[in-house]
Image (tube, rainbow, N blue to C red):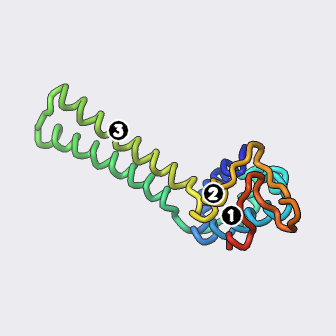
Amino acid sequence: MTTLEYFKALALELRQRKLSEDQVTDVLRELHGHLQETGDRPENAFGGPKEYAARLPKGNTVSRGSKVAYLAAGVLMVVIGVKVFTGQVLGISLGFPGTLIYLGATVLVTFALIAWSNVLQRQLPEHIAADLRRAPQENGTWQMQAGSDARVPRHGGHDRKDCQ
């Protein structure tokens, strides 16, 4: 798992534990700084994302991704409710092709909202994502830049002060 993948998985785990966005950002910033200082791989330094997140106390914040997932469930219930109401109570039929199109559109919208929810749950704070994208690593490690006391990504980058 690359460092970027690790951070995305950890962001997901932290949000599932209902930590606020500020708390997620603080945890990711702290871990990012530690990796820059030590040169460790995330798994070696912190364990797996799920295990690391489990060490932190649960929060009480509903993330944007969770809100979108709730929206998807709500849309699905409303659309099915409208179909049942119009067909059973009002006696309005869309016919077989109309019903297929209606249900197909419902499934598409629901899947799109669920996919969007997943993207939001794994989203990294912009400055951390930019730092990690600027310095892709094949093996997810950090290394010491020659002649410096600051750890920097293997393929160039900046020192930790830029991340704060």
- Image location (x, y in percent) of residue 154: 78, 52
Q: Which mark is residue 50?
A: none
Q: Is residue 114 visible?
A: yes
Q: Is residue 13 visible?
A: no
* Horizontal arrangement in the rendering, residue 118 relative to residue 30 (left or right): left
* Horizontal arrangement in the rendering, residue 152 relative to residue 62 (left or right): right
Q: Mark 3 or 1, which is nearer the eye? A: 1
Depth order, front residue of 156/118: 156
Q: Which mark is residue 11?
A: 2
**What residue appears at the point 68 percent right and 71 percent down from the top-left corner?**
162
Q: Amino acid at mark 1?
A: Leu
Of pointers 3 and 1, the one earlier in the residue sequence: 1
* Horizontal arrangement in the rendering, residue 66 relative to residue 73 (left or right): right
Q: If the image is split into quadrants, where does the C terminus sit?
A: bottom right
Are the two marked residues, 3 and 2, in contact with CB atoms closer than 8 angstroms?
no
Q: Secondary structure at mark 2?
A: helix
Q: Amino acid at mark 2?
A: Ala
Of pointers 2 and 1, the one earlier in the residue sequence: 2
Q: Which mark is residue 28?
A: 1
Q: Which residue is mark 3?
A: 108
How many neighbours does mark 3 have within 10 angstroms: few (below 14), some (14-19), or many (20 or more)? few
**What residue appears at the point 76 percent right and 66 percent down from the top-left corner?**
33
